[in-house]
Each structure stands twice: as C-alpha cells, then as structure tokens.
Image: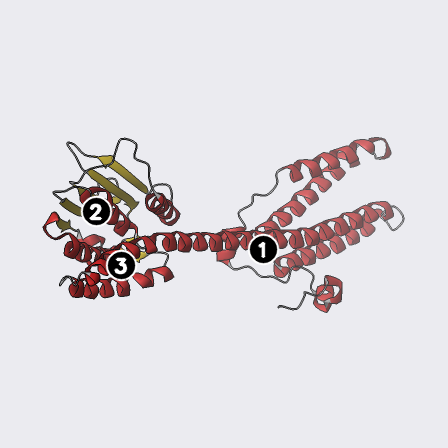
Amino acid sequence: MNPPAKPWYRDWTQWVCPGPSRVFTAAELARGGQQPWPPGIDGYIYANVLVLALLNIGRMPPWALPLGLGVLLALCWAALRMARAIWVQPTRKRLNLGIAVAAFSFGLGGFTLMKTLGRDDAILPFMGLLAMFVLATSSWWFLSLYRSQQIEARLQELDAQDEQLRLSRRLTTAQIHPHFIFNTLASLTQWVETQDPRAAPLLQDFNAYLRATLPMFEREAQPLREELELVRRYLAIMQARLGERLAWTLDHDPALDELPLPPGSLLTLVENAITHGIEPALRGGRIEIRTRRLADGRAEMSVRDSGEGPPADFQEGLGLSNTRARLQALAGPVAELRLTPLQPQGCEARMLLPLP
C-alpha cells in the first residue's frame, strides 16, 4: 500500500510554493478536465462589487465613486481571469505566478496611494486593497486545490469505468467460448465411442481450433483475418461431422484484414447458422460468408444460410445478445447486429462496424 499523503501544513514546500502537488499531463487534462468554468461566479462577484459601491455612495466625493468603482471592476476582472487560468490548468507554477503578479500590483498600488493621498488619507484605501489581495490569492489557492482534486477524482472514475468495461468484455467472451467447445466435444466423443474413422481428422482440426481460439481470452479485439481463421477451423470441424449436408463459401475483401472485431463475434454467427439452420434440416444447407465495405463508411460481415430459418417465436439467445453488446462496447452505438429471415427459407446475420 502507498503511504498516506502528508497534510498540506506538514509539507514544507507548501509554505514556500503553495498549490497542488499533482501535475497533470495534457492527455489527462483533456480526458478528465473538461468541466466548464461555472459562469455564476462572475455574476456573483460583480454583483457584490456593485452592492459595495452603492453602500458607500454617501461616504465618497462624487468624483471618487466612478473612479473607485472602475478600479474595483478592473481588479475583479483581472482576478477572475487568473482564476479561469488556474481552472484550466491547476498547477503550482501558474498559481504562484498569479500570486507574484498580484503582490507586485498590490505593492505598486499601495505606494501610489501613499504618494498621491498622503499617509493618513491612504490608510482606508490601502486596507481595502490589502483585503482584496488576501481574498484573491487565498481564493486562487483553494481553487487550485479543489480543481486538482476534481480532475483526479474524474480520472479515477474513468479508470474504474474502463476496468469494468474490460471485465465485462472478458465475461461475455467466457460465456460464449464454452458453447463452441461443448458442441465439438460431443461430436468427437460420439465418434471415438463408435470408432468412426472421422474421429482422428476431427481431433486434429479441433486441436488447431483450440490453439487459435484460446488466446482470444486475453484480447479485447482481434483483426478480422484472425477471426476468419477461427471460422475456417470451425467449419472444417463441422464439415467433418455433417459431410455433404454442409457446404460453405467465403467471399472476403482483403482490405478489411486488420478491421478489429470482438473475439469470436463472427464465429458466433457461423455457429448459430449451423446449429439453428443447417443441422435441423435433413437435407442440410449452404452457408455463405461475406465481408465488404459499404458506401456509408462501414464494414459489413454477413453470414447467410439456407437452412430451416428462425421459427415464428424466435428469441435471441445469450450468444447473439452478448455479441451485440460487445460490438457496441468496442465500436459505439453505430455498430449493429441484424438478423433477417430469408424467403422461402434461411436466415442472414449481418454485423456492421465503422471502418478505422
């Protein structure tokens, strides 16, 4: 565990150079520092200056009121400009630069008052100027600490959301993966028990399939070319099982080789086409896999089968719902997964993703 941070008053650097110790990079500020400056602060401060001027109308000569009000408004404007700069980038360097400029301005203003009005007459304006200096610099200090903590808290919140999203993707991948393995193991077990000569080739294909599939647990995305290799391995296994009842073709655009996909997403569509379309049909059927670029700037991956087609009361299972969620987690709401019955029979599943 990291040692607890020392209170600010026990950190000697805060007495020499006050301000937040955390220095944010440009990327961190762009990610966690997008909160806008509260506009109500400006109105609140200017309103208080006007109220203060109204309360002192009778105590000042007519010529001094507009002059004093103008000076106060100018000082408030400068203080707010500095506060906005600290809000954008709350660093010690920026805070102490503002304090140094304010101290110089205060000293120059106090000296000017003493020379212009004399020592006795300058006491009251000088004390007012001192109060504004202390109030402004203290406000900048507290603002820098608050803003720094706000950005740090936002960054921690975003990191937690990203970690939760990564865990969700891993969970959905884990829920899909056993479905493929169990179906294949069931066929392999049956053939071994009946000493079917197709068992040995199937075992070889299954071994190659596992070698290609297991690494997808460690990824949030993989290129389309690797996903297609998984599909080919799976179809080789099902070809051995179904024989002439299964025919398939692949029409792939090589320009989409590096398109990122959630691991196992296209494989899920192919597996569903065989499980719900080809296997229930006595005559079998054909699967057509196609990848292409669309005119709207998206890529399309489609799986079309000529099997039984979805029943009238069809409801999506866990595999399809997880695949849709993973697509949108990877590419945003523009990603789609559509399932369309075909006539006179069959079904088409389409994945639509934005091109990189």
Estimate the spatial distance between the alpha carbons at disc 3 and disc 2, rounded to whole Å. 16 Å
Callout 1, which amino acid?
Glu
Q: Is residue 19 visible?
A: yes
Quarter assignment of residue 338: top left
Report the front residue among 3 and 317: 317
The residue at 31%/41% (across/down) is 336
Estimate the spatial distance between the alpha carbons at disc 3 and disc 1, rounded to whole Å. 50 Å
Quarter assignment of residue 344: top left
What residue is disc 3 on? 185
Callout 2, which amino acid?
Ile
Point out residue 56 in the picture as x, y percentages from the top left corner. Answer: 83, 34
**Callout 3: SS:** helix
**Callout 1: SS:** helix
Q: Specify few, some or many for label 1: CA neighbours under 10 Å numbering under 14, 14-19, or 20 or more.
A: some
Q: Is residue 258 visible?
A: no
Report the front residue among 88 and 30: 30
Report the front residue among 38 and 167: 167
The residue at 28%/43% (across/down) is 352
Residue 152's disc is 1
Q: Is residue 301 above or below residue 65?
A: below
The nearer-to-camera label among 2 and 1 is 2
In the rendered view, does 351 fall on the left or right side of 112? left
- Most distant residue in the left direction: 244
What residue is disc 2 on? 274
**Callout 2: SS:** helix
The nearer-to-camera label among 3 and 1 is 3
Sequence-first disc among 3 and 1: 1
Sequence-first disc among 2 and 1: 1
Callout 3, which amino acid?
Leu
Point out residue 64 in the picture as x, y percentages from the top left corner. Answer: 79, 36
